[in-house]
Amino acid sequence: MENCRVHETSGSTGERLLIARTPTEELRLFGLRLRSQILNVLRPWHRRFIIGASPRKLAAHKLGVFRTSGVDLSLSPKEMLDKAELHRPHIIKGPPGALELLLEEDPQRLTALSLEFILSGAEQLPGGLRDRLEECCACRVIDSYGAVECNLIAWECRHCGMYHTCDDSVIVEVLNGDRPALPGQEGDVIVTALHSYAMPFIRYRIGDRVRLPASSSSCSIPFGVIHKIQGRSVDYLRFPGNIAVSPYQIMDQLDAIPEVSRYHVLQDETHSVRVTFEAAGTHDPSIEHRVRDSLKQVLPADVFIESRRVDRIDSRSATKRRFVQSRITSAAA
Ligand SMILES: [Zn+2]
């Protein structure tokens, strides 16, 4: 056990969870992540620039293939761009929050990198951010879906647009209640990690919701498919009548209002939702109404929406640009 690498996560319940893996398990999972990139976009001559992880040093790197460099998330966006320009990557890989910081720091410098692909992972990718990155860099953004407990779960396929499950490292079940979800239905993700012997996860409810495709896949890549990652079930807003609204529906609505630069959405009562937002560079007095009206489109009709513009969001979670949280459990709703 002393050789194990220990990872930390907030787990499916929001409680702190430590996860241990042996070096062999780590290496195997690294290989599977690399394979998913090769099946999708990665070619041996591509230089990758990885934000938030120190790249492994492989024998192949000495031969000049699969070259990588990395930067720590503690660097400023300007320092990250400085390092990226030195490395001249074909591909940048990072969590959406960090990619967004680069985009806002200096879009022209990001454009000038002439990237071939952007790989996003570790957090969920809001649709609005994907569009902005693709427009700025004139290249595809390709997402992956994983969890600390079992590493890579699925990756977005550039050919079919679905997420392929990493079937030889994790068994992914999608349950609607206690039964397997049907095609087109949404459900809870249950994982069984096939390479985690130091700390097994067997039929473990990861806390995420996904939607299955309505029809079977015709993709040439022979792995299972998930249609869409809906978000962590703990972050769903819950209302009476067993109605659950995905945090990504909320984000899509608010991201469509260009003046809104940062927001927190909080549900602390069954029939009311509070939105606090920053809107730099506009004096439009109607913006609070527009924010409320945009959320009315995705929330039940009888929900009271409080919309408040502030100069600066001040809370423990202020480092997050988008924050959607419910304090209502499914039982209370
Ligand atoms: Zn595919």
Image (spheres, rainbow, N blue to C red):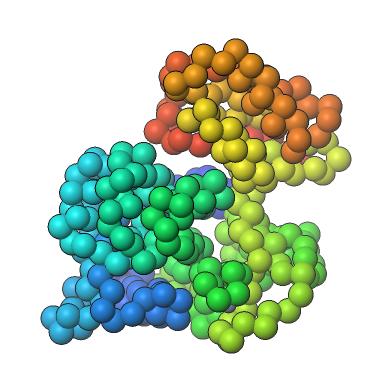
What is the tally of numbered marks visible in this picture? 0
Q: Where, quadrant-wise, is the N terminus in this rendering? A: bottom left
Please indicate whether residue 133 sits to the left or right of residue 88 in the image: right
Residue lying at the far right of the rendered structure: 241
Q: Is residue 147 left or right of residue 108?
A: right
Q: Nearer the viewer, residue 144 or 288?
A: 288
The relative height of residue 80 versus residue 265 in the rendered view (above or below) is below
Q: Position of residue 202 (x, y in %)?
A: 57, 71
Position above or below: 240 against 315: below
Q: Residue at the location (60% across, 38% down)?
A: 256
Determine the quadrant in which ligand 1 lies: bottom right
Q: Is residue 321 at all visible to an observer of this figure?
A: yes
Asked whether the viewer can see residue 274, the reply is: no
Q: Residue at x 84, y 27 (%)?
A: 302
Answer left or right for 134 relative to 235. left
Question: Residue at horizontal 46%, vertical 52%?
Answer: 135
Q: Residue at x 83, y 30 (%)?
A: 301
In the picture, residue 332 is in which quadrant? top right
Q: Position of residue 107 (x, y in %)?
A: 34, 44
Depth order, front residue of 302/105: 105
Instruction: Give the x, y percent position of residue 192.
Output: 56, 73
Residue 324 in percent (x, y) is at: 58, 36
Q: Nearer the viewer, residue 231 or 269?
A: 231
Left or right: residue 33 versus residue 128 is left
Q: Splitting the image into 4 quarters, where does residue 24 fall?
A: bottom left
Image quadrant containing the C terminus: top right
